[in-house]
């Protein structure tokens, strides 16, 4: 079984360690400090002792230590918020496209691993859903540190393939993820945009916060082909098209712009964060940028 | 259609190259497993169709580019019926304008040189075995070679030698000659090429009917020629010309004052405020003057000169002006200067006292300086004889004979006089109280064939003062002997009182050249002076005596100039004119001893011509007809030194205005002529006529268009704009 270190390089982990995922809205669970959770002191963990100074509350004195040492110490506790995050990783055939670098799927699971590690380190609950045409794995959110291993194992063991039907899958998932929380979707989102928006609206209706990390290969954005190309569909064996890419490029770029605009408008309408990500950028850098942005909100 | 480079037509196969490349690329594709399949499809069906159409169009354009390029290199030629012509033999007449207006331009590049070179190129480009003739338009139209020739090299060699300055263009005549020449030629394809500057004065509306007549003649030819008007030279009207010279005397003697008036005209739009005009005698500059000529203005300059030696002299007036046409900046004239003019006075009434004789007043009038014994010289010398003394011997060295009141002559005397006049001598006849009218009317007039011009019908008037007298009718005189009296300073002819005069009967309706004509009349309508041509000479008969017997003519101030004018006019007939118009023959009368001798004439180009003197009425006559070239001709006569002739041309062509494009089209219409402006244009026209039209130029534009279309389409299809 591969440990976190096999997926995440130490450099990548160091970059993320200083960031905090800040939930945008009230989630269930006990929290204090920055978070405004309605469930106060649900989970309090001792952190350290500190010498009493004048003005400290006397009720926070550790009388047991005083009895043993005859000195006054204040007990300090770790403040934390429980965030229930579920990573939805697209394992459909379209995610297999690799271009000249990492495949979109590999890039997606690396991002998922980063997020899992980060959130579990903060004692948040992290769940995982892998899917293509249907839900292939569903791991409910847990906050145990050992849960990370489960998640990473699942990600690595998930084979890619099959057609995508995002909207259908998401509709199926709504009853399963019954407690509201953060949904992080890692997908290329290829498919019918209006249907996808309906499914996402369904999630929003269940009070979930949604972040879509839309994974793109640079080839898909630039369409750099010059010679004649036979494009074979990654999701269907029968769909093959022989094309002069030079002549088709204008149409392709036009279609791409329209697709991205529809998606962006839909997400904006439902207050969903859409973050386009290309596989040629270091995943950790992209993730760090995104988290910094969320912190400002 | 045919192709000049047929082999290169194989290049059209290159049209398949884009198609092959297309198919090759299509077959050598790369397989890419692809996710975003839904982005590959055009959104709408129309968009799909548009893309397919654009792609197809692009492929077609790309195939068309090498195809058009190959066609272009193969030099396609559009042919109609001309195919049959090809390099066929033709009969070509080149009508070459060698008039003096073609001198326009710089020394080595005049319009004529351009025209000659163009004609030469035309001849060199004729098909093998073609027939050619060159007709020259200037002066007297004539062919370059005697007959049309198949030897084009010879025609070309002759053409290169040709010089310009052959007078003004005789357009209808030269066209008629060209059409006539075409009619005599042999080949089935005939061409008439008019190479000219198409000057307005040479193609006037006035000659249009004549030109149309010749054009109709051409249309009636069995083989209708193709006509081309090749216009040479550009219009530049900046020109000043010496139009003509007027002389103060008919005859000039040694030591006599001689006035020359030069008439100048500025044809252009440039003003010449200080135009220098030089007067030269025998090549030596004798005086100079200045004249101011505004645009379009006429001007006159007067020069005075006295010749100190007898013989043939040449005077020249030259305007020093920087204009485009030098040929008309000078005007030459040959002036014969006589040491004496012998006049024989036959006195029919010698009289008793002083001035009673019939010729006494006349003698004084003819040699006034001698009469008053001054140092000034009289040109005229007189010899007075009685009628009985008149014979052939007396007439030998005389220039003019005056019969004054001579009653009658015997047959021998009449014959001698007839020979004298026929040979160019002058005869002046005055009546008087002694004349026998019957003899005059019967013998001397000889029913119109004799010397006396007319019939003496009656003696009019009366010596009695009670009867009304007559006078000379003053009018505008056209006769050269009387034109001086158009100027009142020379005296008023009407002041003379004429009491008695003979009525001279006129023959109505006589208009032949030899018929008598009236120079001046009396105020009652009766003739005063009547002239008749007889051979080379002339006779003038007066109806009033030259003495004071019947009138007071000798007392009037005009008597002297009148007698001098009449005598010198008649004497001038003695010698054929030295200044002739272009095309007119040169005639020199020389002493009889030169008869049969060979003499040399030098033409303006310096070429020598051997001429033989023939006998004519006891004198030697030299005749030269080929005066197509204007300028100075010199006849080397062994006894009296050279005799100069000047052949002049009208200065009409000094106005260098050319026909406008529209006018040229109008002129060309009856001829169905094509108009071209240069050899290149003619050559292209000829190529098109003979071989069809080469279409490489439009094809080149098509090719450029296709290249731009390919660029634009490739940008549009490839989405380079985005």
Image (tube, rainbow, N blue to C red):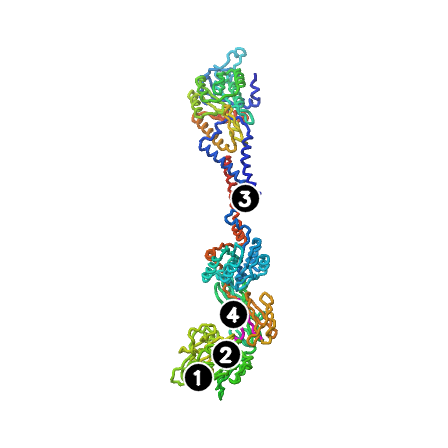
Of helix, strand and loop, which one carries label 2?
strand
**Label 4 to label 2: alpha-carbon separation:** 28 Å
* Mark 1 nearby-residue class (10 Å; few <14, some 14–19, many ≥20): some
Q: Chain of mark 2?
A: B
**Label 2 to label 1: alpha-carbon separation:** 22 Å
Q: Is residue B584 magenta?
A: yes
**Label 3 to label 2: alpha-carbon separation:** 85 Å
Magenta-highlighted residues: B564-590
Q: Identify residue for label 2.
A: B427
Q: Chain of mark 4?
A: B
**Label 4 to label 3: alpha-carbon separation:** 64 Å
Of callouts 4 and 3, which one flags the residue occurring earlier in the amino acid sequence?
A: 3
Q: Identify residue for label 1.
A: B550
**Labels 4 and 3 touching (C-beta < 8 A):** no
Of callouts 1 and 3, which one flags the residue occurring earlier in the amino acid sequence?
A: 3
Question: In the rendering, at what x and y percent does residue B3 appear?
Answer: 55, 45
């Amino acid at each position: 079984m591969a440990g976190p270190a096999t997926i995440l390089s130490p450099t990548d982990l160091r970059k993320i360690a200083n960031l905090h995922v800040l939930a945008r809205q009230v989630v269930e669970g006990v929290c204090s400090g920055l978070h405004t959770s309605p469930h106060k002191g649900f989970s309090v963990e001792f952190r350290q002792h500190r010498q009493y100074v004048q003005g400290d509350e006397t009720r926070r004195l550790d009388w047991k230590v005083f009895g043993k040492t005859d000195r006054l110490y204040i007990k300090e506790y770790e403040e934390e918020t429980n965030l229930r995050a579920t990573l939805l990783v697209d394992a459909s055939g379209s995610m297999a496209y690799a271009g000249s670098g990492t495949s979109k799927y590999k890039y997606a699971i690396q991002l998922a691993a980063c997020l899992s590690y980060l959130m579990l380190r903060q004692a948040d609950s992290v769940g995982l859903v892998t899917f293509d045409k249907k839900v292939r794995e569903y791991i409910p959110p847990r906050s145990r540190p050992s849960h990370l291993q489960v998640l990473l194992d699942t990600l690595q063991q998930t084979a890619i393939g099959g057609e995508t039907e995002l909207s259908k899958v998401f509709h199926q998932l709504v009853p399963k993820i019954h407690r509201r929380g953060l949904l992080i979707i890692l997908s290329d989102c290829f498919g019918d945009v209006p249907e996808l928006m309906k499914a996402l609206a369904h999630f929003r209706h269940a009070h979930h916060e949604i972040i879509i990390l839309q994974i793109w290969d640079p080839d898909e954005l630039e369409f750099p082909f010059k010679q004649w190309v036979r494009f074979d569909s990654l999701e269907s064996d029968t769909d093959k098209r022989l094309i002069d890419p030079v002549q088709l490029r204008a149409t392709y770029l036009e279609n791409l712009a329209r697709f991205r605009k529809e998606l962006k408008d839909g997400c904006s309408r439902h207050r969903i964060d859409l973050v386009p990500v290309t596989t040629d950028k270091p995943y950790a850098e992209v993730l760090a940028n995104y988290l910094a942005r969320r912190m400002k909100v | 259609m045919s192709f000049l480079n047929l082999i290169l037509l194989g290049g059209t196969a290159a049209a398949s190259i884009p198609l092959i490349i297309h198919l090759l690329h299509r077959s050598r594709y790369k397989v890419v497993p692809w996710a975003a399949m839904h982005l590959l499809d055009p959104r709408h069906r129309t968009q799909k169709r548009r893309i397919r159409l654009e792609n197809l169009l692009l492929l077609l354009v790309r195939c068309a580019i090498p195809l058009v390029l190959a066609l272009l290199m193969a030099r396609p030629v559009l042919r109609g019926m001309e195919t049959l012509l090809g390099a066929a033999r033709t009969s070509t007449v080149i009508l070459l304008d060698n008039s003096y207006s073609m001198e326009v331009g710089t020394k080595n590049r005049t319009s004529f040189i351009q025209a000659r070179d163009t004609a030469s190129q035309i001849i060199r480009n004729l098909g093998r075995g073609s027939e050619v003739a060159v007709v020259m338009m200037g002066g007297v139209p004539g062919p370059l070679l005697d007959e049309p020739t198949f030897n084009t090299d010879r025609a070309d060699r002759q053409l290169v030698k040709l010089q310009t300055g052959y007078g003004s263009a005789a357009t209808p005549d030269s066209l008629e000659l060209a059409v006539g020449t075409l009619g005599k030629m042999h080949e089935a394809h005939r061409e008439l090429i008019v190479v000219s500057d198409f000057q307005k004065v040479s193609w006037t509306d006035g000659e249009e009917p004549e030109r149309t007549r010749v054009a109709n003649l051409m249309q009636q030819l069995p083989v209708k020629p193709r006509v081309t008007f090749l216009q040479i030279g550009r219009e530049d009207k900046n020109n000043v010309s010496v139009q003509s010279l007027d002389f103060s005397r008919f005859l000039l003697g040694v030591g006599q004052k001689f006035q020359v008036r030069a008439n100048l005209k500025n044809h252009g739009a440039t003003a010449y405020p200080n135009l220098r005009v030089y007067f030269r005698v025998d090549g030596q500059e004798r005086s100079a003057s200045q004249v101011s000529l505004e645009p379009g203005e006429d001007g006159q300059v007067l020069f005075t000169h006295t010749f100190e030696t007898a013989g043939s002299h040449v005077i020249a007036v030259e305007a020093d002006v920087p204009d485009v046409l030098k040929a008309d900046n000078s005007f030459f004239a040959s002036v014969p200067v006589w040491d004496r003019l012998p006049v024989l006075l036959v006195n029919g009434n010698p009289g008793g006292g002083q001035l009673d004789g019939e010729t006494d007043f006349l003698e004084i009038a003819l040699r006034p300086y001698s009469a008053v014994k001054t140092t000034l010289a009289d040109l005229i010398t007189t010899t007075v004889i009685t009628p009985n003394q008149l014979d052939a011997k007396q007439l030998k060295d005389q220039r003019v004979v005056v019969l004054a009141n001579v009653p009658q002559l015997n047959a021998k005397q009449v014959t001698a006089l007839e020979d004298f006049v026929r040979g160019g001598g002058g005869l002046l006849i005055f009546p008087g109280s002694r004349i026998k009218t019957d003899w005059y009317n019967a013998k001397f007039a000889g029913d119109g064939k004799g010397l006396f011009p007319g019939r003496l019908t009656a003696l009019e008037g009366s010596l009695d003062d009670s009867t009304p007298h007559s006078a000379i009718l003053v009018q505008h005189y056209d006769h050269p002997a009387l034109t001086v009296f158009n100027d009142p300073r020379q005296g008023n002819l009407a002041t003379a009182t004429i009491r008695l005069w003979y009525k001279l009967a006129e023959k109505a309706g006589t208009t032949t050249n030899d018929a008598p004509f009236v120079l001046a009349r009396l105020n009652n309508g009766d003739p005063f002076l009547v002239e008749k041509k007889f051979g080379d000479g002339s006779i003038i008969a007066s109806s009033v005596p030259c003495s004071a017997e019947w009138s007071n003519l000798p007392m009037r101030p005009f008597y002297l100039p009148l007698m001098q004018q009449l005598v010198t006019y008649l004497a001038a007939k003695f010698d054929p004119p030295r200044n002739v118009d272009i095309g007119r023959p040169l005639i020199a009368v020389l002493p009889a001893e030169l008869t049969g001798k060979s003499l040399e004439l030098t033409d303006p180009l310096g070429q020598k011509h051997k001429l033989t003197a023939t006998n004519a009425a006891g004198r030697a006559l030299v005749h030269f007809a080929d005066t197509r070239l204007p300028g100075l001709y010199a006849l080397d006569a062994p006894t009296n030194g050279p005799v100069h002739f000047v052949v002049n041309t009208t200065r009409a062509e000094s106005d260098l205005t050319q026909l406008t494009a529209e006018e040229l089209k109008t002129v060309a219409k009856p001829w169905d002529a094509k108009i071209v402006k240069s050899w290149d244009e003619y050559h292209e026209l000829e190529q098109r006529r003979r071989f069809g039209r080469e279409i490489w130029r439009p094809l080149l534009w098509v090719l450029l268009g296709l290249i731009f279309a390919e660029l634009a389409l490739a940008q549009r299809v490839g989405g380079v704009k985005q």
